[in-house]
Amino acid sequence: MGEPHVVTLRATRAGDLDALFGFEQDPTAVRMAAFTPPDPSDRAMFDAHWRRLLADPTVDARTVRADGEIAGSVARWFEDGVAEVTCWIDPARWGEGIATRAMRLFLDEVHERPVRARLATDNAASIALLEKLGFRHTTTQTSFANARDTEVEERVYTLD
């Protein structure tokens, strides 16, 4: 797969949710993400979650588009007063550089610092992405991962 020509971000809207929900049905992606809703296939729960996100003025949720097609999402919210970011890319588009481009664009527009990101310690691709973007590993903790139905080690990364 080649790299996309153009990666853009726009505010997430209700019409994007079918595609975003579809991306979250891939079992490999769900396992890698680890920290998912208890039942990622529950569309009603997914829609309720996104309604809350889209209604919350402190959340910045964007749809990632690659060459004009929806390819994923990025978002920023606050946890204990600190900005946190996340990214979910269509597994069919992994390896195309979309996550790197999308996160760079997003971080250029998210001015809060520090900003944190959390991930399972075995999520090598996301670890490499965060480190490429200048995040540094600040701590490791144990958290319950719904997708694995067990406690897993979670790395916390920070960008100052």
Image: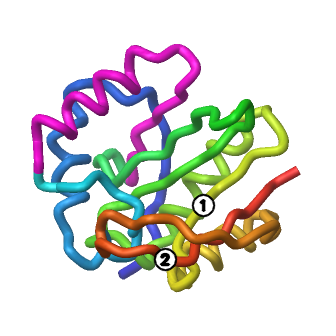
Report which residue position mark 2 lands on.
152
| Part of the protein shown in magenta | 42-66
The number of discs equals: 2
Image side of residue 90 versus residue 103, left or right: left
Taking the image as shown, residue 122 lies to the left or right of residue 31, namely: right
**Residue 131 position within the rendered picture, expressed as x and y whole percent measured from the top left:** 74, 73
Residue 90 location, x and y as percent? Answer: 31, 62
Query: Which callout, 2 or 1, points to the residue nearer the camera?
Result: 2
Which residue lies at the image location 40% right of the left edge and 39% below the top edge? 63
Q: Amino acid at mark 1?
A: Arg
Task: Specify the quadrant of the image occupied by residue 135.
Answer: bottom right
110 vs 27, left or right, is right
The answer to if 43 sits in the magenta stretch is yes
* Few, some or many residues within 10 Å of mark 2 (<14, 14–19, 20+): some
Marker disc for residue 85: none
Specify whether 138 is left or right of 117.
Answer: right
SS at badge 2: strand
Residue sticking out furthest to the right: 160
Q: Is residue 47 above or below residue 95?
A: above
Q: Residue at x 65, y 79 (%)?
A: 128
- Residue at (51, 40) in percent of width and height: 75
Residue 18, image x and y in percent? 15, 41
Counting other residues with Cα less than 10 Å from the Cα at mark 1, is it few (<14), some (14-19), or many (20 or more)? many
Give the labeled residue for mark 1. 118
**Residue positioned 88% across, 50% down in the render:** 160
